[in-house]
Amino acid sequence: MTNRERERATLNFEKPDRGSVEETFYPWVLACQRFKKEGMPAHIADGAKDITNDIVGHGENDNPEKYLPVSWGEGVMAYEEYLGFDPLRRCHFVLPFRRFEEKLIEETAEYTIRQDIFGRQNKRRRGSEIETEHKPIIAGARDWERMKEHAQGELEQYFSEEAIRAAYEPIRAGHERGDYPIRMNLEGFFWVPRELLGIEAHMFAFYEEPELLHDICEYILWVYSTKLLQVLDIVQPDVIYMMEDLSGKTGPMISGVMFDEFVGAYYRRLFPLLRERGVGNIFVDTDGDFAMLIPRFIDAGVDGFLPMDVNAGMDIVQVRRDFPKLKFIGGYNKLCIAEGPAAIDREFQRILPVIRQGGYIVGSDHQVAPSTSLEDYRYYIRRLREAMAQCGADL
């Protein structure tokens, strides 16, 4: 089987020659730095950059992949193959108002205020490593109207047919040969308003400014329904996942009714367009305990979830009992990897029933932490390959 065929069979409850051996997310830069100290070649560790690294330090208009990060994924794939994972090509499609030049806004003897890559202004007092929010990206409908005007200019500059083709065409041939599956992430309809407004203001907006939230979501949907579909005419990702961190350790931050209105309604309009253009599986990336919303996610068209945060109570064994056709990526307690071989083996034993059922690519339940040694991570990967040989055994 090709790597692409194997991933499709693994996720679609088939019985492949073996299950895909993949990681949930791209690596944490701090973990890569530790691995380099412990023997990983520098060009491998340094090549596995964070998604924003190619933009940091550039002027606002310097990077042709400012919103279409694709070449970035080459270094991550090399890092993962070096460690023994199957080839997997990661890419993003970034909304045209989600990247800004990092710059100093104000500096005094007491503090500095800087704008980050997302457009937030953060304040740091002298002698402190802690940043606090000074100013959100937008503070209401008037700011949002200005942001849309900015976004239209960015669309004209960075999202031409030529730019889209230049970004995504280089990964097309390898994907069509089956050398690697493609995993693409998108920012979702809860995530983006929260990022723009800030957490507290976002929560109030559900009650005080629902029209603003809907206007933001309509604009997101319009961008995906136009520019993203041009991308999908070139490559058809095997997994698209929506970033929607809408839960905490004790449960979701919004009710089911609000989910249906402000998130699910937009999924129902977007997902059929993605499937018509050949997208494989549609996943949602949300941390925390979101169990009570799973039926609503499924009803809105979601195939599966990642990373399935174990320490927030998301037990994939129980969730699979409750929802037999739900698919997972992740679900392995990342803290066990740092605890060494015995803990690693116990965690594999816990999730083995789900591996045998299929529809599951095992991965850490978030990025592997810098507290993990390279030796223990290599042991985890060896055991992962052994465990995934049982993929679909119970089918």
Image: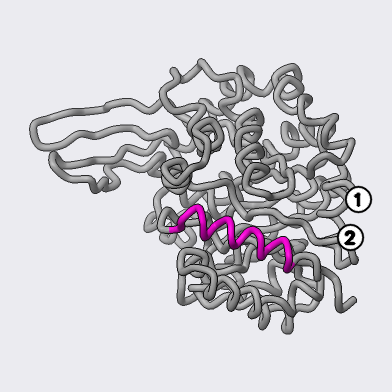
Front-most of residues 256 and 80: 80
Question: In which quadrant of the rendered image does the C terminus lie?
Answer: bottom right
Q: Does residue 385 belong to the magenta stretch?
A: yes
Front-most of residues 203 and 162: 162
Q: Does residue 217 belong to the magenta stretch?
A: no
Q: Is residue 183 left or right of residue 257?
A: right
Crowding at mark 1 (Cα within 10 Å: few <14, some 14-19, many 20+): few
Vertical position of residue 369 compared to residue 313: above or below:
above
What's under tag 2, amino acid-wise? Asp
Vertical position of residue 257 compared to residue 25: above or below:
below
Let me know if residue 300 appears in the view.
no
Front-most of residues 107 and 306: 306
What's under tag 1, amino acid-wise? Met
Which secondary structure lies at badge 2?
A: loop
Question: Circles 2 and 1: CB distance less than 8 Å?
Answer: yes
Q: Identify the residue at image location x=85%, y=71%.
A: 392
Q: Is residue 146 left or right of residue 1?
A: left
Q: Which residue is mark 1?
A: 1
Image coordinates for residue 184, horizontal then vertical, percent:
69, 43
Measure how far apart labels 2 and 1 are at the Cα level: 7 Å
Front-most of residues 217 and 313: 313
Which secondary structure lies at badge 1?
A: loop
Image coordinates for residue 292, horizontal then vertical, percent:
61, 77
Q: Main secondary structure of the magenta part?
A: helix
Q: Identify the residue at image location x=79%, y=44%.
A: 181
Residue 6 location, quadrant? bottom right
Label 2 or label 1, whichever comes before in sequence order: 1
Q: Which residue is mark 2?
A: 17
Q: Which residues are magenta?
A: 372-387
